[in-house]
Image (cartoon, rainbow, N blue to C red):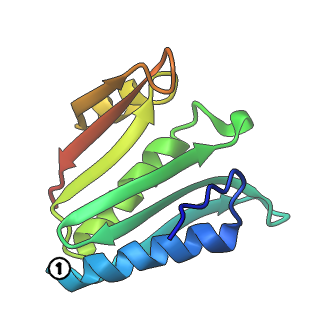
Amino acid sequence: MPLKIIHQPSDTLMQTLDQKITEFNVQHWEVKQKYPLAIIVENEDGELQAGATAKTFGDWLLIENIWVSESLRGQNLGSQLLAKLEQQAIERGCRHALLDTLNFQARAFYERYGYTVQWTQEGYPRTGCKHFMTKTLTE
């Protein structure tokens, strides 16, 4: 069968391939499901002002995003979101947290809360870097 190159694959194709690898992984991993988690902050009009997304998976909290609108930065909101993610993960039975952050993002922020760099990918995507960080969660 010939290989077909698709320079702009559809979202449906990308999701299908993700699903296929997930189906394969489920057959081999002892943990079968990732559980999504989101925490948001809205203003009086219901507009999103800050939020965090993650998944819990076995013993792990996998932090995907923490975002605070520019007008609210520096007011401890990011810290509150992180603490709430960790609290929820502990309640779900997680013992560790994992995240990645780019060199211009939040490495120092996460280090203040006990995260340590396990690995740094230099030259990502060209001249920057990406830090992969973990933390042991405690109650």
**Whether residue 41 is visible:** yes
Image side of residue 98 versus residue 35, left or right: left
Residue ID at (18%, 55%): 137
Which residue is outermost to the top? 127
Comparing 40 with 10, the one in front is 10
Residue ID at (66%, 57%): 6
Image side of residue 127 versus residue 116, left or right: right
**Whether residue 35 is visible:** no
Tell me which amino acid carries mark 1.
Answer: His
Residue 12: x and y in percent read 66, 74
Quadrant in which residue 34 is drawn: bottom left
Residue ID at (51%, 19%): 126
Residue 81: x and y in percent read 47, 53
Taking 108 as reference, is 43 above or below it? below
Which residue is outermost to the front? 1
Taking 65 as reference, is 106 above or below it? above
Task: Count how many numbered circles sit on residues in the image.
Answer: 1
Image side of residue 30 versus residue 87, left or right: left
Which residue is outermost to the right? 45
Q: Residues within 10 Å of mark 1 (few under 14, many from 20)?
A: few
Image side of residue 43 versus residue 25, left or right: right
Residue 91: x and y in percent read 25, 74
Taking 37 as reference, is 24 above or below it? below
Q: Secondary structure at mark 1?
A: helix
Instruction: Identify the residue under disc 1.
Output: 28
Residue 139: x and y in percent read 16, 61
Residue ID at (57%, 30%): 74
Comparing 71 with 14, the one in front is 14
